[in-house]
Amino acid sequence: MTDLKQDIKELIISSLNLGDVTPDQIVDDAPLFQEGLGLDSIDALELAVAIERKYRVTIPDEAVGKKVFSSVSALAQYVSENRPPA
Amino acid sequence: MRRALVTGGTKGIGLAIARTLAARGDEVVALYASDDAAARAAEEAMRADGFAYRALRCDVASAAAVDALFAAEGERGFELVIHAAGFTRDKLMLMMPERDFDDVVAAHLKGGFLVAKQALKAMISRRSGRVVFIVSPTATLGRIGQTNYGAAKAGLIGLTRSLAREVARFGITVNCLCAGFVETAMTASLPQKARAELLAAIPLGRAGRAEEVAAAAEWLCSDGASYVTGTVLAVDGGLT
């Protein structure tokens, strides 16, 4: 799970072009959007696409998105539970 | 080579757009609802001209069908999406079965939603893309017998204006192309009297050609239209 969280942080930085942020600056349990990194719902679109492409996990609607994007921990949890077997 | 998805791309305006894009070097995947014979004929004609063109049967009103299509077409997706699929089922509204309303709205409006939604994923990753919805003067002028079609096309204009704002950040443009009266199989069913009245209302005094609509679609997909989004481009002889 720790590796997955690290992976996800790197994905957030690369897909959202947050060049000046390092993975260790992203707190596992801090909100990703609105507060935290100051990302908005349109950024979330891009992250949702990146997550779907990398992990084959779909974020089907806004309710799920809200829950999943609440923090890196929540996102890692969702990805590990919904990932298709490799 | 860009990849273009053209719904309704085996007949009428959709086929003309597919041909215009293919002729400038784009690889075209055309979707059609049911007419296998027309699809095979279109494939033969396009291949005879050396164009990269495939016609696939897909009900764009079905999320499952659209999702399966995009899964099969791979992660690269399409640089261009033109939603030209559709049909009319004209009736006065008081005589219109619920089904005729639902089916027309499903093909035009929901189909546009489903296809664009899938297509946007690759476009967002690539940070570029063009989406064009073919609409009709009925959307803004209205026409007797076309409450279903008019509502669906007006809906696409509304969808376009909002979606353009949602995806502008990713370098994706979303526009409507309002195609006026063009002689195609779809408009052939128009009664003679309605046809005469319609022609009389067109300032340029004639029906349009599918190629004239296709030229505008090509432009909306070109670099020259990079600063155009959320708008309705009318190619209708001045009707609207």
Image: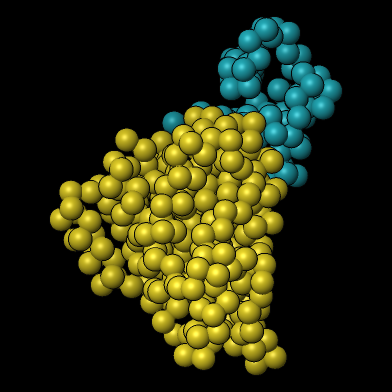
**Left or right placement of residue B25 versus residue A70 in this view:** left
Up/down of B92 relative to B21, above or below: below
Along the viewing direction, whichever of A18 and A63 lies nearer the viewer: A18
Quadrant in which the C terminus of chain A appears: top left
Task: Name which quarter of the figure residue B16 lies in.
Answer: bottom left
**Left or right placement of residue B40 versus residue B112 in this view:** left
Up/down of A65 relative to B95, above or below: above
- Residue B105, given in percent of the width and then of the height, sits at 60, 70
Q: Residue at x 31, y 54 (%)?
A: B19
Q: How many marks?
A: 0
- Residue B37, given in percent of the width and then of the height, sits at 26, 72
Q: Does residue B177 show up?
A: yes
Along the viewing direction, whichever of B203 and A29 lies nearer the viewer: B203
Colour assignment, chain A: cyan
How is the protein colored in the picture? by chain
- Residue B157, given in percent of the width and then of the height, sits at 65, 57
Quadrant in which the N terminus of chain A appears: top right
Along the viewing direction, whichever of B81 and A40 lies nearer the viewer: B81
Q: Residue at x 37, y 59 (%)?
A: B211
Q: Residue at x 75, y 44 (%)?
A: A63
**Left or right placement of residue A64 versus residue B150 in this view:** right
Q: Residue furthest left?
A: B48
Colour assignment, chain B: yellow
